[in-house]
Amino acid sequence: MSKQQTHAFQTEISQLLDLMINSLYSQKEIFLRELISNSSDAIDKRRFEALTDASLLNDDEELAVTITTDSNAKTLTISDNGIGMSYDEVIENIGTIARSGTKKFVEAVKNSGKEDADVSLIGQFGVGFYSVFMVADKVTLTTRKAGTSEGTQWESDGKGEFTIETIEKDRVGTDITLHLREEESEYLEDFRLKHIIRTYSEHISLPIKMLAPAPLDEDGKPQEDVEREFETVNSGTAIWARPKSEISDQEYQNFYQSLSYDMEPPLSTLHHKVEGNMEYTSLLFIPKKAPFDLWNRDNKKGIKLYVRRVFIMDDAEHLLPHYLRFVKGVIDSQDLPLNVSREILQSDRDIKKIKASSIKRVLDELTRLAKNESEQYQEFWSEFGQVLKEGVVEDMANKDKITPLLRFATTQSDSAAQTVSLDDYIGRMQEGQEAIYYITAESHQAAKGSPHLEVFAKKGIEVLLLCDPVDEWLVNSLGTYNDKPLKSVTKGDLSLSDEEKKAQEEQKEELSSLTEKLQDVLSEAVKEVRLTYRLTESPACLVADENDPGANMERIMKAMGQ
Ligand code: ADP
Ligand code: MG
């Protein structure tokens, strides 16, 4: 047996632990959800690995999470027979290597400015394990990885250091024992524990077990010295496999929250059972609020793929396009092989069909919301609009479905809020106006204040004010909408009547000597000096050529080093 080693927690983790230890948060109970969720992940992994290596799972072994208490020792133990961890994995996963979310979570809690910050979001940040230190002053974790014979024990009081050593452990999986603080003894009570499990983990699709109450004696008192049996506390069935009509809103909501760690209910729930040549069930949720890592390119999670109830992988990439990365949910296929890999997913025809239908379901739902529940749609847009805009560029096949969902800020109002659809815009076009005009700029303020808008304001023509980073790409890929071309106000000429054109030609002649002179003086700096009719208040402005990239695109290209 190896000597015990002591390691220091990584700095950011230490900061996180300080927050946990000194917490006054009211939602301490979520530590149990975090541990159960880790156990459930570990069991899913073991089941998955056993698909290719049957020796990792014994036929007679029931995969479950077991929760026991010892009221004398004041300990609570959560045990699973999941994949377990090797010695090195324990060091890596718990204590020495900070996840990208560690710092973000610490900042989120500190910045919340509330005494009672929303620590329940911890799971979203990938650091849920550490929530145990809200209720425990010492934690002992023992684990043995499936396929290995040695166990590992990790122990810490959360104050700067942990110890680790090799031990003997007879069962594969992980046991986590919390030495509860004096004031947290409520977590020794079965009643309280069951309530927490049913609140947060009801729909985890594996059994969560606790000891059943002792049978009563003749006087109605619990018998002592009898062996108590384990009973399953949660429903333990896959909610998506049940008929829609039997699932309550509350059940959907609980399941969504266990998937997403979101405290809000979802905006929409889309549950479909598809039968026929290809059988599968999909249960998708559109959230109300964006998660902290919406902009993290590496985050490819969100849709869990199951094959006949066996969890295969969390992979949003092949099941939904990147621009729908805010959607959470489950897809359970009847037909895919259990040993399906990422490579197979990439080229599988059934998966492509499932993906196409899922996109359609989400976009149809957004279309419905936009039409019938515009207030809710507006809230959705302010959270996820920037992401949905990527869809116009990324998903040509669905461009026509996405475009009417877009919302913009325009010169119609002073507000920077994006509320105007292209159909609204077209409905307000001036007589004879043929194009949809827009301006791109770094900020709403800059767009709004541009001298290019003067002539449009004078003519009463509405202009889209675009200042999101993706907007330049968006308008380039849009090209036209309902046969109306999108035109930048900084490029080319406004279309004019014949009379106006004639008057302008005359003026151009008259002032030609001036423009030529200016052209000479400025030849180093500009391509051409021309007379303009766009300005009503400013004396001059810079414009891009029809064929040049827009000014904003130039900025973006510069930023990318081109
Ligand atoms: P997350 O679950 O988001 O990865 P956690 O802080 O909850 O973050 O857990 C950190 C890591 O520790 C997990 O990713 C996993 O590798 C490991 N781990 C935690 N609990 C268990 C467990 N019961 N069995 C196996 N591995 C676990
Ligand atoms: Mg976790």
Image (spheres, rainbow, N blue to C red):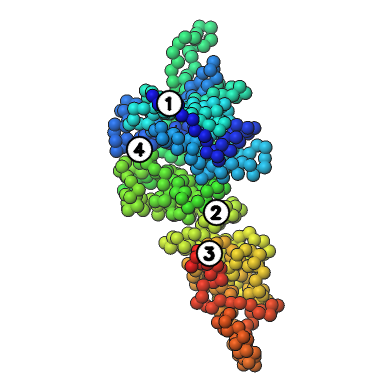
Query: Taking 157 as reference, is 276 above or below it?
Result: below
Q: Earlier in the sequence, mark 3 or mark 2?
A: 2
Q: Earlier in the sequence, mark 4 or mark 3?
A: 4
Q: Earlier in the sequence, mark 1 or mark 3?
A: 1
Q: Is residue 435 left or right of residue 112?
A: left
Q: Mark 2 — residue?
A: 384
* Between 392 and 96, the one nearer to me in the picture: 96
Are the residues at dot 4 and dot 2 in contact (C-beta closer than 8 Å)?
Answer: no
Q: In front: mark 4 or mark 2?
A: 4
> Marks 2 and 1: CB-CB under 8 Å?
no
Between the residue at mark 4 and the residue at mark 2, the CA separation in whole angstroms equals: 33 Å
Q: CA distance from mark 4 to mark 3?
A: 44 Å
Which amino acid does the dot numbered 3 rest on? Ala
Residue 184 in the figure: left or right of residue 89 = right
Which of the two discs, 3 and 2, sits closer to the camera?
Answer: 3
Q: Amino acid at mark 1?
A: Lys
Residue 274 in percent (x, y) is at 38, 46
Tell me the distance, in whole angstroms, between the alpha carbons under discs 4 and 1: 33 Å
Residue 3 image label? 1
- Sequence-wise, the earlier of marks 2 and 1 is 1
Residue drawn at the location 49% of the way across and 59% of the way down: 390
> Which of the numbered marks, if any, corresponds to residue 104?
none
| Residue that numbered label 4 is attached to | 48
Residue shown at 47% from the left, 19% from the top: 212
Q: Residue 93 or 201: which is nearer the viewer?
A: 93
Residue at disc 1, secondary structure: loop
Whether residue 467 is situated above or below residue 325 in the rendered picture: below
Q: Quadrant of residue 244?
A: top left
